[in-house]
Image (cartoon, helix red, strand yellow):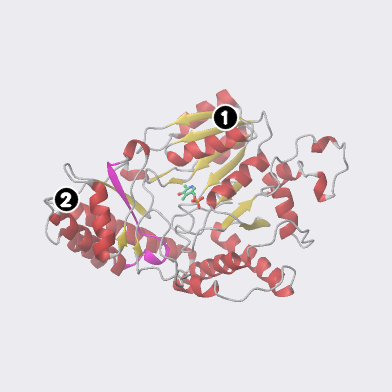
Amino acid sequence: MSLPGPIDPPARLLMGPGPITAHPRVLQAMSAQLVGQYDPFMTDAMGEVMGLYRRVFDTANEHTLLIDSTARGAIEAALVSLLEPGDRVLVPVMGRFGHLLVEIAERCGAEVHTVTAPWGEVVPLEAIAAAMEAARPKVLAMVHGDTSTTMRQPFDGLRELCDRFDCLLYADVTATLGGNPFPTDAWGVDAATAGLQKCLGGPSGSAPATFSPRAVKAIESRRSIEAGIREPGDPATAHPIRSNYFDLAMIFDYWSPRRLNHHTEATTMLYGARECARVILEEGLGAYQARHDLHGRAMLTGVEGLGLAVYGDREHRMANIVAVEIPDGIDGEAVRGALLRDFGIEIGTSFGPLAGRVWRIGTMGWNARTDAVLATLAALEAVLRRHGASVAPGGGVDAAYDVYGTAA
Ligand SMILES: *Cc1c(COP(=O)(O)O)cnc(C)c1O
């Protein structure tokens, strides 16, 4: 019987909303050999990862670590560990990932309140304040950058609001961390979770996360009997965290110097996550973010140079992704298919109300690069012309060149 051959993926340039082409150094780090779970090399590497991600999250939080899952798992870990059944949570919703927070919080048994913005806009602070006043939540759970609409929610004023209502602030920063400013401590965020496959430049499967002392206190008050800290019948165990795998109290113990066994750390993912952070910090967090800003602007200016319209509120767009309106009469999926088949370039489709209306083009991590931007714009122009769209010849690349010219 013949076997499938060794894995040999085609060359692709992933310019969608994630995953993106992983940085070669990250792939290289991930091919390193395993060591035992409690090998001093491994525990040292865990300590290094904590230190590296404190810098990426711009935080002093001791509890800064990796959750072994994709970003969605880390959202679930944060919410299931913070929310007890019956707790109130407020979720401002401005796109698909806000709905995901709602869905996960509901499964935690929380009483979920929402405040929504139309797609393509962010939720105004005053609307959040009014909803806080009405709901009095224990947790305010926010998406920082909602990839589905490309909107980036401002965090100004949220800490003051949370202090007023004695509320914890959680943020899903999966799509924004690294490529957009997110100073965890300066913004007073209590819990934030990410994923590697967007601006951090790695594969999906590891989720950097950080928790303030306030969040840690709330989580540890629910420490399970299994962890051996509390006795059966202790009132604090009345509402144990309703997940074993995502029990952050146990995960904290695992990442503490006590190294209490929980799961087997995903060693290869940890090597990858460590290299992602090294790549970022070697460049410098500020420079890394500025690079996302520059190439994101070049892509946006380029698609406009082709005569295409950009979707959503300009003031609040994420640096690293642009939603482009599909011209009338053009089959968006056929264009995406031709870009992949003929140029090896992947751009993103859309969901829900935007399905069939916009493409989403990302410039993240290793792909926030001049050649990746120019190649994508040139290919998009060629494919659009063959599909009968009237686009300005050379307009995309020229407009992007202008952005680079003035920035240089
Ligand atoms: C991509 C993304 C996620 C989900 O990430 P997975 O790694 O696929 O679980 C969650 N939130 C936001 C804002 C995202 O962009």
> Residue 112 bears which disc, if any?
1
x, y (%) of residue 63? 67, 55
Tell me the quarter of the picture where residue 261 sits: bottom right
The magenta-colored residue range is: 356-370
Q: Is residue 58 visible?
A: no
* Sequence order check, earlier mark of 1 and 2: 1
- 113 or 314, which is in the foreground? 113
- 52 or 101, which is in the foreground? 101
CB at mark 2 closer than 8 A to ligand 1?
no
Tell me the quarter of the picture where residue 298 sits: bottom left
- Kindly give the residue lying farthest to the front in the view shown: 1
Magenta stretch containing residue 365, yes or no? yes
Q: Is residue 22 left or right of residue 404?
A: right
Spatial CA span between label 1 and label 2: 42 Å
CB at mark 1 closer than 8 A to ligand 1?
no
Q: Is residue 368 left or right of residue 260?
A: left
Residue labelled with disc 2: 307
x, y (%) of residue 301? 24, 55
Q: Is residue 46 visible?
A: yes
* Rendered position, 334 above or below 47: above
Magenta stretch containing residue 204, yes or no? no
